[in-house]
Image (cartoon, rainbow, N blue to C red):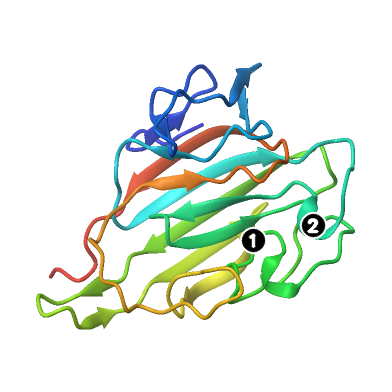
Amino acid sequence: PAPSDAVVLFDGKDLSKWRSVRGTNISWKVENGYMESMPRSGDIRTIDEFGDFQLHVEFAEPAKVEGKGQGRGNNGLYIYGRYEIQILDSYDNPTYADGQAAGIYGQKPPLVNASKPPGEWQTYDVIWETPRWDDAGKLVKKAYVTVLHNGIIVHNRQELYGTTPYRALGDYSKPHPAHGQIQFYEHGNPVRFRNIWIRPLGEYDKP
């Protein structure tokens, strides 16, 4: 269960804390305590924005294995629409290293593949420290992330090189606020989510 100081983003009942990236009604399915991305349903993101945080997400890949590599249970935890932690069925499913489950997409593979078999519920626990710029637009702190996949540390306060674009080198060339929305992708694969909550951690750069 979520701790008492957490903001519950999805309680298994409705998507009132979310909106469609397309600006239309959300067409993800909600039933039996979970929400599920449907083919061509589009990305969703939180209505509220968050700075440094602890985020808990539970997800399940399709029990019936279809596709391979990046075409198997592909989704993504997209922080501020800029930084992605990959969601993928990486159980006995080879793909490029920094594109597997729990990878910092395009930058760092996880320390270990902690994936469970398809159909089983899995967890991500993410501790995020947002990057910061001064008033002149100079970077004064890079982004850092700690990720536990199914209770196993797969990134230990890992420094990010910058944003996580596809087949390109990310950077910090475009300053942004020290807060933003949490987003989930929709890559044509059905992926289920439940019990999503977040705890704001405050501003680390203040005394």
Q: Are marks 1 and 2 in contact (CB under 8 Å)?
A: yes
Residue at 49%, 25% in the rendered image: 26
Q: Position of residue 91 (x, y in %)?
A: 84, 55
**165 or 8: which is nearer to us?**
165
Q: Residues within 10 Å of mark 1 (few under 14, many from 20)?
A: many
Residue at 70%, 50% in the rendered image: 74
Residue under pointer 2: 90
User: Which amino acid type is marked by label 2?
Assistant: Ser
User: Which amino acid type is marked by label 1?
Assistant: Ala
Residue at 50%, 36% in the rendered image: 196
Residue 111, picture quadrant: bottom right
Q: Position of residue 47 (x, y in %)?
A: 33, 35
**4 or 47: which is nearer to us?**
47
Residue under pointer 1: 102
**114 or 38: which is nearer to us?**
38
Report the side of 106 relative to 55 (left or right). right
Q: Secondary structure at mark 1?
A: loop
Give the Cα separation between the discs numbered 1 and 2.
9 Å
Q: Position of residue 60 (x, y in %)?
A: 72, 38
**Rendered position, 173 above or below 151:** below
N-term mark: 1 or 2: 2
**Rendered position, 146 above or below 76:** below
Residue at 23%, 82% in the rendered image: 140
Report the side of 191 relative to 52 (left or right). right
Q: Residue furthest left?
A: 135
Q: Which of the image's four quarters has the C terminus?
A: bottom left
**Rendered position, 195 above or below 53:** above
**Rendered position, 44 above or below 114:** above
Q: Is residue 2 visible?
A: yes
| Numbered disc total | 2
Q: Position of residue 30 (x, y in %)?
A: 59, 20
Q: Residues within 10 Å of mark 2 (few under 14, many from 20)?
A: many
